Image (spheres, helix red, strand yellow):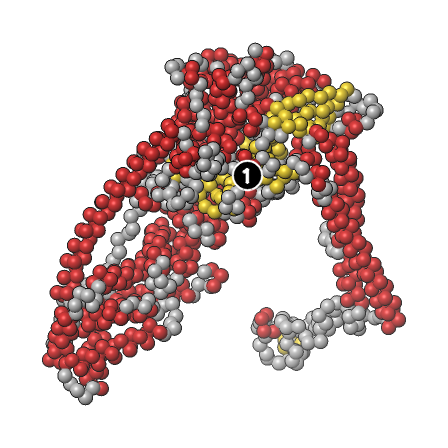
Amino acid sequence: ETVSQNHGCIKHQQTLLNQLREVTGTTDIQLLQQALQVSNGDLGEAVTFLTEKNAKVPLQDETTYYQTSQVASDRYISVGSQADTNVIDLTGDDKDDLQRAIALSLEESNRAFRETGITDEEQAISRVLEASIAENKASLKRTHTEVWSDSPNPHDRKRIDNCPVGLKNVGNTCWFSAVIQSLFNLLEFQRLVLNYSPPARVHDLPRNQKEYRNLPFMQELRNLFSLMVGSKRKYVDPSRAVAILKDAFKSSESQQQDVSEFTHKLLDWLEDAFQMKAEEDREGEKPKNPMVELFYGRFLAVGVLEGKKFENTEMFGQYPLQVNGFKDLHECLEAAMIEGEIESLHSAENSARSGQEHWFTELPPVLTFELSRFEFNQALGRPEKIHNKLEFPSMLYMDRYMDRNREITRIKREEIRRLKEHLTVLQQRLERYLSYGSGPKRFPLADVLQYAMEFASSKPVCTSPVEDIDSSAPPGGTTGQQLSMHYSHNGSFMNSQQQRVPIHKPFTQSRLPPDLPMHPAPRHITEEELRVLEGCLHRWRSEVENDTRDLQGSITRIHRTIELMYSDKSMMQVPYRLHAVLVHEGQANAGHYWAYIYDPHQRCWMKYNDISVTKSSWEELVRDSFGGYRNASAYCLMYINDKKPFLIEEEFDKETGQILSGMDKLPADLKQYVKEDNELFDKEIEEWDIMQARKAQQEKLALATAAAAVSAASNPEYMEQPSPTNDSKHLQEDTERAISRAAAEEEERSPEALLSAAIKLEYARLLRFAQEDTSPENDYRLQHIIVYFIQNQAPKKILERTLLTQFADRNLAFDERCKSIMNVARAKLDLIKPEEVNMDEYEMWHQDYRNFRETTIFMMTGLELFQKTNYVEALMYLIYSYQYNKELLSKGLYRGHDEELLGHYRRECLLKLNEQAAAMFESGEEPDVSTGLSIMNELVVPCIPLLLVHDAERDLLAVEDMRNRWCSYLGQEMESNLQEKLTDFLPKLLDCSTEIKSFHDPPKLPTYSTLELCERFSLIMAALGRVPTKGR
């Protein structure tokens, strides 16, 4: 009962702190505690204290330190470390209005707590969940250009072997996926959740709100985990678990809060659920809560206040660390473990200084650090993200922070402090050598001495630097005859000769005289002076270089000594291995979350990004997590005790000794649940396959009909038309030329012999084209299908039938020779047996060529529109040409066009549209703002996954540029309606999922003859060739 009362007291104090933080926007936990202390718990007085313009923080008294064990105990230690985005402006001059606002806010908050028993913190979490649910529902009403849709083909959503299962983003729920995946991959945690069974007494009716809230959530979490274990799907839908969380609260607001609060609350609910079970299972003993044992540890707060010492033991869950001002995790920890001036703690003197140290007495198996990368900007009235770089190791040794190593750590810290003081002195001395001078520009002293030596040893000159320049010469610098001047009778100066004034030509006449020295030089210097000066400068430069090397060497040795200070074996007995890194990309009020999780069995890092689960590397993790490189950085680090392998070890069957995997891990009820879901998915696949088989049968019939039509008409549609068109005329002319050449070269004039000779000549001509190395604007593949076939190594039978079809064209010239050859060709086509030429394969090759021509038209049209700066229309042509071209290239190198070229213009088109849309948004004018956001939502955002899916460096940088442009607006003043639109838009832009959105259907293409197509293609490619290389 006493424990329960203390727990309630702690929660009430935490509620007061959260109310203060929300009303005032103050995030300093100590300042909030002081305000409550000064006001004796009166919230109105505490707010007045905090909002005074010149309020000074009073000296802390002893009670403040002793209260730490209550206010900041157990899992609440880091709650409130992040700024709330819902800040009330209390900076107005009207004191009456201010007091009314404070009183109204506090009265409403207190009334809500009394009526519902729900704290402000819980309401904040509710807002996160409701925002996600609302976003999910709203997505159903959006246009098709904004919907994240599943692939209609269930085979695309089928799990491959035992690959990890992803989680679908059901509307701004990437934070949920990142946290859940990190916990799920802790196999001990996974086992606890899967094997959880609710207390027997709650099966009839839950007794209180906690049971009503937590138990349904636990069941949905078990269901979700079971699907992640045994599902046949590549990814599963967590909507029901999110919906249960949402239904647990009553809130009318939909405002996204800091995701770290969700993590805190999630562990709270899990702890409460397991506590109920533990209390039921206990038999006269103190119940053990597995969540507490897994995630919570203890530390000793050792403090001194005005010479008085104290010690308090406190519990912690997620340990908060400040990022700003630190370069690595150990620096953050060192700063977090020491508060205030602590020297008096180490001495027997009665000092007036105050401070406290934290020493871990018990570390949890799962040690979680919460990196505070958000701080509240009081001036702007909103939170901002800290993008500073912070390094962290894959293996973290916690020995130096343990209470049992307190004395040795203090000695080492003192030694490090002394070394750093010495290091500072050495660095200051080195800086004097490397930045020498008294003016604004400074240079390395060794270089200064070298420059002086070079000046002294330069060839002396005996004239002034301006004496050899003739000031009377004309601007052109003419060295010919001087113009003599005399005074004329009418009082004006005249030339003695009538000559034109020379025209100044700067690029041809302003040339340096050949005898002008390259550098300034002394006018007079004797050999003796030079010898003495050179000797001194050489000696001084050597001394400076030696001093610089000595200083750099000493600095390096000190750095190395500091690095190795804790490397002895006695300080490497508490190893924690990095298990998961939760990453946030974006700004404080908008962004995307994903996780890197280590797989000990594959010994590699995995990237969990919503539905996408891919192999990664430490290098990629560092790039995305350390910060400083772009807007992405780690906000949570999860380490596990490396001496407790049960955390990540698979479970063994007690009877057989075999590792339990897949469905064998699951209890009977969850096996049935997963089995039913898998049966639904199998049925979906079966129905899809039946539907596709039906379509394939219909297509086969259509192909058979088309093949019959081809056989009847002799030529494919792009080779022969019912009447002579421009395209068929071009082909007929080639055919007739081949026949004429064959007739001229062949002695035997029979139609069979002429046909054979003509085909050989035509093939030889086309083979030369196929083998010729041409410029990009002359693509012979567009001129003839045989060139395409040769370059892509089509089967011989396909080539022969295609050439026969060309010579069997009914539209050849109506002379007797052509007619007879045409009849022979048609007869040979009829004699070809089905087993000799596979008509399905024949049609496939011809379809590929049709696709190539179609892709060319998409590409050509898109590039033409891009050249005309019509980026809106150009985009779809470039997008589809790139996608179709990629499909062609997957079959062979010469099946399509230059992928890099298409990728460049696709990327540039998106960047241009992004630039246009951003400019419209910056204008602030309503029609322009709406148009700009429409361009982004309907054109740019749906295409971003296409740039992300293959991880091409230039595409990733382009996406980063586009996102940075819009994220830069977050720190700027703008009207509230613009801020609202920006906040609504940014999550869509920052979503890193590579799931392809559906967008506009491909544009309809015009029909071009071969001649027209080749001419237009040549023109646009030649125009691109004139673009500088750097521009391409």
Crowd around label 1: few <14 · some 14–19 · many ≥20 (10 Å):
many
Q: Residue at x 44, y 29 (%)?
A: 194
- Of residues 604 and 252, which is closer to you in this image? 604
Q: Residue placed farthest to the bottom in the image?
A: 747
Rendering coords of residue 72 (x, y %): 61, 22
Q: Residue at x 78, y 66 (%)?
A: 455
Which residue is identified by label 1? 579
Q: Residue at x 46, y 38 (%)?
A: 658
On screen, residue 747 versus residue 118, left or right, reads left
Q: Residue at x 61, y 27 (%)?
A: 297
Q: Give the vertical position of 576 relative to 1023 (above or below).
A: above
Question: At label 1, which amino acid type do we have?
Answer: His
Position of the N terminus by quadrant: top right
Rendering coords of residue 267 (x, y %): 51, 26
On screen, residue 457 versus residue 152, left or right, reads right
On screen, residue 420 versus residue 909, left or right, reads right
- Of residues 888 and 405, which is closer to you in this image? 405
